[in-house]
């Protein structure tokens, strides 16, 4: 049940801060509803999880989707993690954090609440996040895939626990955006995190994608960010699923395209734009169907590598 509610109007849409009680804890989340939302028309939903040590408010601005949502008509929800050992976090399983918080159950309950609050298209629910929020998105793809259509991780990965216990129920489109010089989540992995290559390989194998990717060198439009981007697209997975990886060569533990210059941030791509471009292609009903994909896909631009297009959705 909803136990708190506060409203503020942006110049575009409406932002609310709400809470639910789950497993004895008050759990808070921020919702952004675009001005085009109508209760008579089901809207897609994007869950946007913050990183460890961050919070929903920071992710609201840092991994900003509002301008895109205003055009494309989807709702954005930024859940708030809980504090463990003095730090906000998402429990993505395993011994890394030693947390006992039921974040899977919270997300499941949150989705029930949102479906009661808004007219949400239950076949178009997506998850993304920064760092620990990226780990959480992969965790949802593995353990709550009956509700999650596709996921995108920015500077996150999979813990060995998530990786070894992963049990997706349908082909799951995956996008991974990661810097090769990430000092927080090592690109090549460690004892507590899988490498980006291992994560990519897991999902392209599960989705039965082509093992040889299409490779695109993203134009180096910013010469002072000290990084470049190479895109790998593994196509032709089951029911049209794909795996995409933006390898930010020289990039750090940051959200590409963020408006304030932070060391290690790449500006050749805008992560939020690429994530929605990716999500908007997929519908859970179609991915779970043996009839195949395409009838519900959305065409965004004649050139999928054009980073200046305006995204629209129906």
Image (cartoon, rainbow, N blue to C red):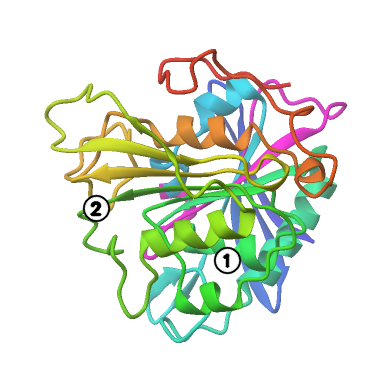
> Relative to 207, does residue 271 appear above or below in the rendering?
above
Q: Quadrant where the N terminus lies?
A: bottom right
Pinpoint residue 228: horizontal percent, then vertical percent. Answer: 22, 35
- Disc with the residue nearer the chain's start (2 vs 1): 1
Which span is picked out in magenta?
32-58
Circle 2 residue? 180
Which label is found at residue 139? 1
Say whether residue 61 is left or right of residue 16: left
Quarter occupied by residue 2: bottom right
- Give the CA separation, mark 2 to mark 1: 22 Å
Disc 1 packing (10 Å; few <14; some 14–19; many ≥20): many
Secondary element at tag 1:
helix
User: Which residue is depicted at the point 28% across and 43% down?
Assistant: 248
Pinpoint residue 196: horizontal percent, then vertical percent. Answer: 38, 59
38 within the magenta span: yes
**Residue 118 makes an appearance in the image:** no
Pinpoint residue 28: horizontal percent, then vertical percent. Answer: 60, 59
Which label is found at residue 266? none
Disc 2 packing (10 Å; few <14; some 14–19; many ≥20): some
Secondary element at tag 2:
loop
**Residue 76 makes an appearance in the image:** yes
């Amino acid at each position: 049940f909803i136990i708190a509610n506060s409203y503020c109007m942006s110049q575009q849409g409406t932002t609310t801060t709400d809470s639910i009680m789950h497993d004895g804890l008050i759990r808070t989340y921020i919702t952004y509803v675009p001005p085009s939302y109508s209760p008579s028309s089901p809207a897609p939903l994007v869950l946007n999880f913050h990183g460890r040590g961050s919070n929903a408010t920071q992710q609201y601005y840092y991994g900003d989707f509002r301008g895109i949502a205003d055009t494309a008509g989807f709702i954005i929800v930024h859940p708030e993690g809980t504090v463990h050992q003095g730090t906000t976090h998402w429990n993505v399983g395993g011994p890394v954090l030693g947390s006992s918080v039921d974040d899977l159950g919270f997300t499941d309950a949150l989705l029930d609440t949102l479906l009661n609050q808004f007219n949400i298209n239950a076949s178009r629910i997506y998850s993304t996040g920064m760092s620990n929020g990226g780990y959480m998105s992969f965790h949802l793809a593995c353990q709550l895939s009956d509700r999650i259509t596709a996921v995108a991780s920015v500077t996150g990965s999979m813990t060995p626990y998530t990786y070894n216990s992963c049990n997706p129920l349908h082909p799951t489109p995956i996008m991974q955006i990661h810097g090769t010089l990430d000092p927080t989540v090592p690109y090549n992995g460690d004892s507590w995190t899988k490498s980006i290559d291992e994560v990519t390989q897991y999902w392209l194998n599960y989705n039965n994608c082509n093992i040889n990717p299409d490779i695109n060198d993203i134009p180096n439009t910013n010469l002072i960010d000290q990084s470049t981007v190479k895109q790998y697209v593994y196509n032709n997975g089951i029911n049209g699923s794909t795996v995409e990886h933006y390898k930010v060569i020289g990039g750090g533990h940051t959200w590409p395209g963020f408006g304030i210059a932070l060391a290690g941030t790449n500006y050749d791509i805008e992560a939020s734009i690429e994530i929605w471009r990716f999500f908007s292609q997929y519908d859970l009903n179609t991915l779970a169907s043996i009839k195949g994909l395409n009838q519900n896909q959305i065409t965004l631009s004649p050139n999928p590598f054009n980073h200046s297009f305006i995204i629209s959705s129906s």
